[in-house]
Image (tube, rainbow, N blue to C red):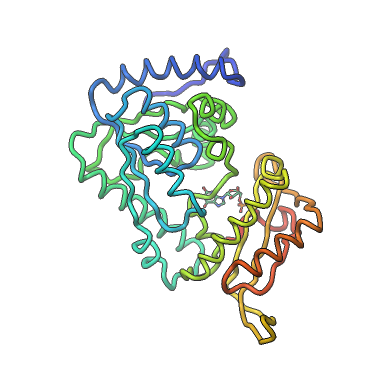
Amino acid sequence: MEEIRRPNNMVRITTPELAQAFIDEQIALLREQIGSDKVLLALSGGVDSSVVAALLIKAVGDQLVAVHVNHGLLRKGEPEQVQRVFRDEMKANLIYVDAVDRFLDKLAGVSEPEQKRKIIGGEFIEVFAEEARKLDGIKFLAQGTIWPDILESEAGIKAHHNAGGLPDDLNFELVEPVKILFKDEVRVVGSALGLPDSMVYRQPFPGPGLGVRCTGAITRDRLEAVRESDAILREEFAKNGLAGKVWQYFTIVPDYKSTGIKNGERSYEWPVVIRAVNTKDAMTATVENIPFELMEHITQRIITEVKGVNRVLYDFTPKPTATIEWE
Ligand code: XMP
């Protein structure tokens, strides 16, 4: 692979004007690189792949084929938002793959965290490769590689996670238009491209999605409890000015039940654990001090609105000793 450099004198992209200059330059470069060929992109709805999609739509229009795989582990509303923004508003050539049953069937009964991650990652590549093989004349594969990915792979911290993973018969040339940008720059560029704030300023979300927050063997009903409680937490954080302030916040539903009372009868249901942390680099993290009244309100909503839940807990543990995620 060609050596990639971020120019030493490159100005940090912090304003819409600088973002626009970057966009104009990249559009010209993308047109030159891609010509009249087709380019494929796995569009997760995360910041990086969304910005790459928006850039490519501007540069080469429907020569871009974006594939959004719904693996069933996305947050509430995410697959809908990807389709609304990219297909309806930006008129992208978007293939939506409903692979929910496929992933959840493969994951059924699997409780070991690393095994779950492997299945999710492996199945994702398989589904994406199947879609790629159905298409004719694809020459390029676009990826949302960013500058820290390059630095980390150079430092041997992790494999350049975006670079491939696809089977050998799918030998695409790479297109990586945001590879010299830091995350904050990608966000500024995303805003300048007209992407909604809810997409551009999203909190970090693990690749295996809600799968690592539905601990142990994933069941559909417990996964739904994770998704619904997460949606309530996000809604309340947004309403109460915490959404842009807290670095990462989510819910976990452990594979464990406890006794409670509902409508005068004994219940035996799951707890929902709330996690809200602040960090700079995710290596260490502190716990957010959420106002008690807000916690009471969120608890009330979760125990009345989320099926199968009779208890709400707050994880007060910093990293270390805990990690941010539970799995
Ligand atoms: P931990 O749990 O290790 O998480 O303290 C640190 C940060 O990394 C995210 N995370 C992941 N992201 N794939 C990802 O893409 C993963 O398997 C994964 N596990 C953790 C986590 O959400 C947190 O921001």
Judge by depth and name the residue closer to the eye, 103 or 295.
295
Which quadrant holds the N terminus?
A: top left
**Relative vertical location of residue 24 with respect to residue 258 in this rendering, above or below:** above
Which residue is located at x 30 percent, y 36 percent? 93
**In which image quadrant can residue 15 be found?**
top right
Residue pushed farthest left?
Answer: 136
For the image, the number of numbered tags is: 0
Which quadrant of the figure contains the C terminus?
bottom right
Position of residue 272 measured from the top left corner of the image (x, y, whole percent): 64, 67
Residue 263, image x and y in percent? Answer: 67, 82
Residue visible at 66% across and 69% down in the picture: 303
Image location of residue 66, percent across then percent down: 34, 38
Query: Relative to 194, is 109 above or below?
Result: below
Residue 242 drawn at (x, y percent): 71, 45
Q: Is residue 170 above or below residue 72?
A: above
Asked whether residue 138 is in view, the answer is: yes
Relative horizontal placement of residue 99, taking residue 239 as reference (left or right):
left
Q: Of 265 and 10, which appears nearest the observer?
A: 265
Which residue ends up furthest to the bottom in the rendered image?
Answer: 265
